[in-house]
Image (tube, rainbow, N blue to C red):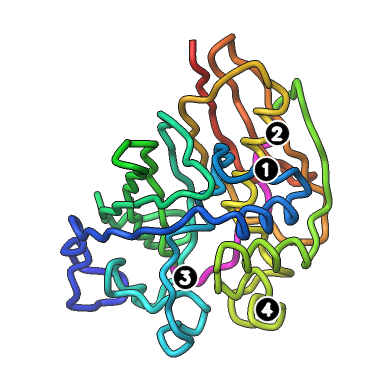
Amino acid sequence: MKTAANSDINITEWIGNHERKQDIICETLVRRMAATLGVIAPKAGEPLPALWHWMFFQPEYSATDLGIDGHPQLGGFMPPALGRNRMWAGGSLEFAQPLTVGEVATCDSTIEDVVEKQGSTGSLVFVTVRHDYTQAGQHKFTERQNIVYRLPTPPKSTSAAAPTAQWSQCLIPDATLLFRYSAVTFNGHRIHYDHPYVTDTEGYDNLVIHGPLMATLVLHGCLKANSDKTITSFKYRGVRPVTLGNEICVAGRLVDSSQAEVWISNSDGLIQQGSVVFAD
């Protein structure tokens, strides 16, 4: 495949790459995530809240292994960036059981697809990574992450208005929240904590709020509003990036007794949207 960077590298050769990681779902990190989000931490032997697994199974790269953006330099398990900015575009999860706090777990990761497409801002490369999580030999859940590599372009600033919500909670994220979430998930991407870098190099007007943080907020907002239900799947996608400085609203509504629509928005429209399916 000929890439926009006119490189001889065929990034489709990364399809099928696989790696296995083990980690302990340790109470220390769980308490730190709970403190970051302002909720009560589960104890050893209790279920790990949905999407908190993003704290674990993180590669421990040294500073010399990082690119200028703070991400690991790509070209090993993940395809090379080829001069593009890397963003987490969305994903989906199929839940069987939650992970258990205090026990060892395994994550098997496989690159399922790499494809280049033309978008309104130019060439985009989409990478789909499948993660299968197990604990004590039992399958817990499957996740697919959609990563997009885009050419450096001005970020989209507006989008369609949010629908009418049945539940909603508004908040104003600050730099401390972003720093603590980056720290607890071992995320070195500089757009979340380095103001000179994100404004001068990547063209944003302020620090960028993490897509995974917003997905966590919107899913737990849905579960709080529907505490009698059990989630079986969650899909989400970023509509546009959003930066600090404005109030965001975490909201949703039931489609029927087994499905919900969820989203995050601000005065400029939708930021992230998704869907939740509940057990019968």
What span is colored magenta in the figure?
Answer: 151-162
Q: Disc 4 and disc 1: Cα gap in Å?
A: 23 Å
Which amino acid type is shown beneath numbered disc 1? Answer: Leu
Q: Marks 2 and 3, how far apart in space?
A: 30 Å
Discs 4, 1 touching: Cβ within 8 Å: no
Residue picked out by circle 1: 217
Could you tell me the amino acid type at mark 4?
A: Asp
| Left or right: 10 in relation to 71 | left
Q: Find disc 4 in the rendering and name its residue.
A: 194
Mark 2 element type? helix
Give yes or no for residue 141 being in the magenta stretch: no
Residue nearest the observer in this picture, 6 or 141: 141
Disc 3 residue type (three-letter): Asn
Count up the numbered dots: 4
Q: CA distance from mark 4 to mark 2?
A: 28 Å
Nearer-N-terminus badge (1/3):
3
Q: Which residue is mark 3?
A: 85
